[in-house]
């Protein structure tokens, strides 16, 4: 899996897992009123400090600061958002090619 992630996702498997967790935490942060510790565990982070570190690395802010900035940003832009894009998306054809390559060779 590590080689597959590195070749096809352009990141290590651990970076991919952190990205998925971060995106879930971001979604919960912006769409719920959950406490940060609940968001942490709900999104798969083992420790609130690790969640804070991931937020600072990706946004330059702690989660609480990010949420406040997003609320102000949304109010100033009349609801128009530009969410952080931290995932790589493939077209259906590209995804099938990647999976076909993986099944044919058994590795990446």
Image (spheres, rainbow, N blue to C red):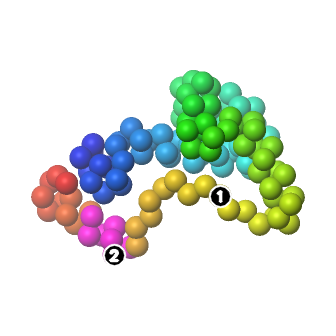
User: Residue 17: percent from the left, percent from the top?
Assistant: 44, 41
Disc with the residue nearer the chain's start (2 vs 1): 1
What is the spatial separation of the Cα atoms under label 2 and label 1, in whole angstroms? 26 Å
Q: Nearer the viewer, residue 36 or 41?
A: 36
- Whether tag 2 and tag 1 are in contact, CB under 8 A, the answer is no
Is residue 75 visible from the viewing direction of this image? yes
Q: Nearer the viewer, residue 24 or 103?
A: 24
Q: Residues within 10 Å of mark 2 (few under 14, many from 20)?
A: few
Judging from the image, what secondary structure is the residue with disc 2 in? helix
Q: Nearer the viewer, residue 48 or 100?
A: 48
Q: Which residues are magenta?
A: 92-98
User: Residue 6: percent from the left, percent from the top?
Assistant: 29, 49
Name the residue carrying label 1: 83
96 in magenta? yes
User: Residue 75: percent from the left, percent from the top?
Assistant: 87, 58
Is 29 on the left or on the right of 87, as rendered?
Answer: right
15 in magenta? no
Q: Residue at x 72, y 43 (%)?
A: 66
Q: Residues within 10 Å of mark 1 (few under 14, many from 20)?
A: few
Q: Residue at x 34, y 43 (%)?
A: 12
Name the residue carrying label 2: 93
Residue 23, above or below 53: below
Residue 6, above or below 102: above
Q: Residue at x 22, y 66 (%)?
A: 100
Q: Quadrant of the N terminus?
A: top left
Residue 51 falls in which quadrant of the image? top right
Is 43 on the left or on the right of 94, as rendered?
Answer: right
Magenta portion: prevailing SS class: helix
Is residue 43 visible from the viewing direction of this image? no
Residue 23, above or below 61: below
């Amino acid at each position: 899996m590590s080689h597959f992630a590195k070749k096809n996702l352009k990141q290590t498997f651990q970076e991919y897992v952190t990205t998925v967790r971060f995106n879930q935490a971001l979604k919960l942060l912006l769409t719920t009123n959950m406490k940060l510790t609940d968001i942490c565990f709900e999104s798969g982070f083992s420790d609130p400090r690790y969640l804070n570190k991931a937020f600072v690395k990706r946004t330059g802010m702690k989660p609480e600061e990010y949420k406040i900035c997003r609320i102000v940003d949304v109010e100033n832009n009349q609801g128009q958002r530009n969410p952080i894009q931290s995932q790589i998306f493939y077209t259906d054809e590209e995804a099938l090619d990647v999976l076909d390559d993986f099944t044919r060779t058994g590795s990446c």
